[in-house]
Image (cartoon, helix red, strand yellow):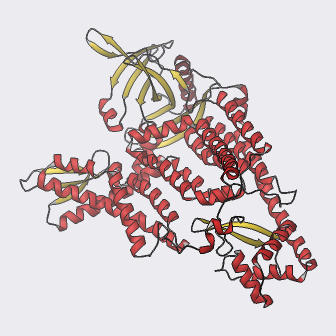
Amino acid sequence: MLRKSWPIFTETRITLGLKIATVLIATIALFSQDLAIIFTDALQSETTSYLLAIPFLFAYLVYRKRKMLAAVIPLENRNQPRETRHLPAIAGVLLSITAVLLYWHGSYTFTPLEYHLLALPLFASGLCLTLFNPQTLRQLAFPMAFLAFLIPPPSDILYTIGATLSTVSSEASNALVSLMGIPSSLTSDAYGNPSIIITRPDTSTLTFSVDIACSGIYSLIGFFIFAAFVAYIIRDKPWKKLTILMIGIPLVYLLNIARITIILLIGYQFGIDLALQIFHLLGGWILVFLGTLLLLAISEKAFKTQIFAKPAEKCPQCIPSTQSNQSFCFACGRIIKSARNMLHKSDIAKITCTILSVILLMSIQAPVFVLTNAPIVTASTPSGEQISTDILPQLQGYDLSFWYRDTEFEARAKQDLAVIYLYSPENDTEDAVWATIQISSTLSSLHRWETCLITWPLSRGKQPTVNQIKLEDIQLSQNPPLIARFFAFNDLATGQTEAVLYWYETATFSVNSTSQQKHVMISIIIYPQNPDDLTNTEDKLTAIARAINDYWQPIKTWSQVTMIISQNGLSAVAITSSIIIAIIAMYALESRRLRIANAKTYQKLSKPNRQIIDAIKALPKNKTPTLNNIATQYNTLTRRATDQNQLLQKLQNLEKTGILESEITNQRDEPTQTWKAQIKLR
């Protein structure tokens, strides 16, 4: 017996391994640049540090489904009508193509990373549907959707929510320390952040600014992911899952208020140094950890939910030796051994086509941001290291000079370098042009102009100090495509009009004889003498930006195919999406037609077979249609006993007619063999 089963077991493992490896390798390879960017940010920035947990949570979600996946992956749709048999695989291919088209379209926009990460779960889902079956994708629906948390939250929303949270947190903490008899007052710092000033026993004062980092917004985002994870894996009713998720959001916020209050108390008693040490100790991950523990305790004590299934009484008939020829238990319906997973010629063809397609896509894939060889930023001189002007091109009619390095801004924005240059016009009638270059290891440290000047003040409940005049995207180069953003505004305090054109690149810098890739934001600025002629200003900035882009020497250009597809990406996505919708509609209509046809077939069945259908339809909702429950209901209807082996044979025969469908249902993550009638009786 062992010698006969070993080749089957080996073939199943090889088949599964090939398919799973194809999905994983294809997805990681195609999205490797994007994953490298976001996880590098997560390692260095508190803003997105929660992303580090997503791969582990995703792995557990898949592991939690391991028994269900082992049962549904080998399923084949041989009993499906010929008209719908291949529709799931076709839909999977189209979904993968849609994801690739969305990816390429995103590369042609000002926000490529967001588009790419949106395409990732779509691409992985399409491959699962192509290489496996709809039942497999149904089991992986939540883990695939969970990957959407990889998309960084929009900065506008982040600042708006964070500002509200910092205001409420500071007011609540200030009120709490005041109730404890500590002299405190609430004000705001130079950047509009709420600040709490406490007076110590020695009459000295300490000021604590509650900015975005202290507001708890990053902890809230991370905890929301954990709360969604916990709500999904608990074993209980949907309303309890939703309630637990809703409880988790204010819970972590209250923990953040407690953290700020504790820091204020420590600062009052022991000074600022110890308070800052405790602040870093009680960081976002500690809040997420404590919040998760509290949420688990609340869900278990208040709602009586279960995270892990309690050991159930073993069904004596589930022992494989007693039913060696059966794949499931006749008594409880639990799958004892999964079906053989054979490697068909169609599987080999699908895997081969997937690998070749990914290799082709990677050969013509463009970088997330335009990749360039960076000119020299610093130069060594006898007097020390100096900022070089070689980083920018010399322009006819202008004198280029280094203006200054903003070290204070570098520290506040967590950037490696922020330098400002000046193009002084030789003709006094021309406008001077300022150029700023910001370099950072993380993309999240390079903030957009409109976000800083408009979104940020609005999020603090204040009116912006500038009035937006124009905001639009401009294409600087065709190949590789580089999209910049033109932002013109009027300073309300001075009445001065300012026009900015800025864009992002990824550049390779030589640092200590080693090459390092950094994210770069380049901005060129004009204070136009004639504010009414913004068209001329925009044209002037665009020409200078294109000169800078050429000077920075883009390393990799796009293929003509990639250019054409990216330029028409949205139209192509609309076409493929429409075809997928049409396939779903066709599948639904065909299923409805089949149920109508089955109603006629039902009338032609013999009385015992009709009684089997009646028994399945008559089962209460709280009864799973397992073989044992169907037999019990059948005995009740016919008032005579029936042999379960004979009943199973009749069920399998009815499956071949299409009037019954065999289903593997999820019972506490245990695969269970059931049957469903594909007919609607009056």
Residue 190, placed above or below residue 313: above
Place of residue 18 in the rendered image (x, y in percent of width and height, measured from the top left): 66, 42
Depth check, front residue: 422 or 302: 302
In which quarter of the view is residue 174 placed? bottom left
Query: Which residue is rendered at x = 59% and y = 41% of the image?
Result: 116
Residue 639: x percent and y percent? 78, 91
Residue 616: x and y, percent? Answer: 76, 79
Side of 374 relative to 31 (left or right): left
Q: Quadrant of the C terminus?
A: bottom right
Residue at x-position 83% and y-position 57%: 84
For residue 415, what is the image quadrant? top left
Residue 87, image x, y percentages: 80, 53
- Residue 63 appears in the figure: yes
Q: Is 282 on the left or on the right of 627, as rendered?
A: left
The answer to whether residue 530 is above or below residue 289 is: above
**Which one is in front, 12 or 511?**
12
Q: Is residue 349 above or below residue 405?
A: below
Q: Left or right of 446: which side holds 647?
A: right
Residue 447 can be seen in this image: no
- As drawn, which residue projects farthest toward the top? 382
